[in-house]
Image (cartoon, rainbow, N blue to C red):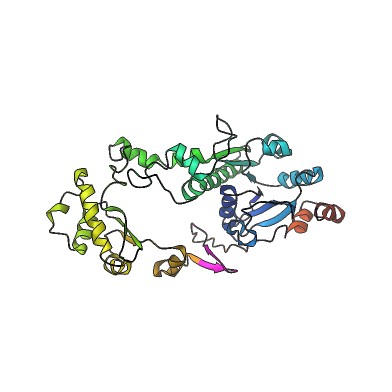
Amino acid sequence: MGILSGIRIIEIAGIGPAPFCGMLLADMGADVILVERAAGKSGDPLDMGDKNITNRGKRSLALDLKDPQAIATLLKLIDGADALIEGMRPGVMERLGLGPDTCLARNPKLIYGRMTGWGQDGPLAKAAGHDINYIGLSGALWYSGAPEQPPLAPPTLVGDIGGGALYLAMGVLAGVLGVRNGGAGQVVDAAIVDGSANMMNLLLSLHAAGMMPTRRGEGLLDGPHWYGSYVCQDGLSVTIGALEPQFYALLLEKLGLAGDPEFARPYDKRCWPSLRLKLTALFLSQPRQHWTDLLEGSDACYAPVLSPVEAQAHPHMAARAIYSERDGVLQAAPAPRFSAAAHTPGAVPRRGAHGAEILREAGCSEAQIAGLLAPRD
């Protein structure tokens, strides 16, 4: 029994952040009903089938949403749901007859979660885009990468997941809590540009204090030699984050640089470029494992840059069972952890695997179920 046991979420299938939000809620024990297109109707080049980890633990119902009977049945399911989440372009759900006005009129306590890149309104609302576009516009991409090089962020993590799925999950849960405290149902407009901009507030605090100027390479977290990544002799990489003076002193000691006068002024920006070159040469002199043996586990603020497969085998990651394989698919465990409500997520469902079960719960007759789930050409 997960901590969200008893909460029912209807998820309209899509790609990217909305399904990830559904996974987060299912990981915590919510009953997430994934409404997918009828078999043979997908045509989605990103359809990963039973490899799609973001569908784990959900129940799948395949419907033809062009069929009025399917829409009527889905509305019956929404009547008994705590929340709905969708990631369509603005206007698509309304054209299907599943817009928030319709759903909230039937279920006034419903939390209607909308996941988009640009938001439900504004000049760009109906334009196509992806993670990199949203975080480019919001400012969240600005500090990623070296000066005079194009910014580069980890694919999907900053926008789709950080600024999108996590904010939608928080909004949906806040809305459900509000209803349970006597409030009304409402729409949650979760836009990646909003969330990724909101994620900037810590950096904006540093910016206001003069520590993160908008000139890239001169800020506290994007310029110093003691905060960044370095390539090793074997072509693998390591990270250093010795921000505080005591951590910097320990780093120098372990690297044999404690008495070097050139490293004595860590916060002097004029020294950063030359000192970064020196550390670049130093880390290139040995393979990654040498630096791991020397620095890992100390307060020098060090970690190797690992691939997900390598990360699975790392002693710390293994001790916490963060990665595992299920049905031949490497995946990460649910997070965060709860001391009194552990929940093991289920498998990735086959498309439509729970259709008859879900429709019976909605009060459909066997004849109606057969008609709704009949194969489509």
Tell me which residue sits at (37%, 42%) in the image: 202
Q: Residue furthest top?
A: 123
Foreground residue, 345 or 250? 250
Q: Residue furthest right?
A: 367
Q: Is residue 85 left or right of residue 64?
A: left
Residue 176, relative to residue 350: is it above or below? above
Q: Quadrant of residue 211?
A: top left
Q: Quadrant of residue 28?
A: bottom right
Q: Is residue 155 left or right of residue 58?
A: left
Tell me which residue sits at (56%, 54%) in the image: 24
Part of the protein shown in magenta:
324-338
Give residue 328's position: percent from left, percent from top. Answer: 58, 69
Tell me which residue sits at (31%, 40%) in the image: 212
Give residue 58's position: percent from left, percent from top. Answer: 64, 57
Give residue 273's position: percent from left, percent from top. Answer: 23, 48
Q: Quadrant of residue 352?
A: bottom right
Residue 351, relative to residue 126: is it above or below? below
Give residue 261's position: percent from left, percent from top. Answer: 12, 54
Residue 183, relative to residue 55: is it above or below? above
Give the tally of numbered discs.
Answer: 0
Q: Is residue 124 magenta?
A: no
Residue 43, relative to residue 298: is it above or below? above
Does residue 320 appear anywhere in the picture? no
Q: Quadrant of the N terminus?
A: bottom right
Does residue 325 appear anywhere in the picture? yes
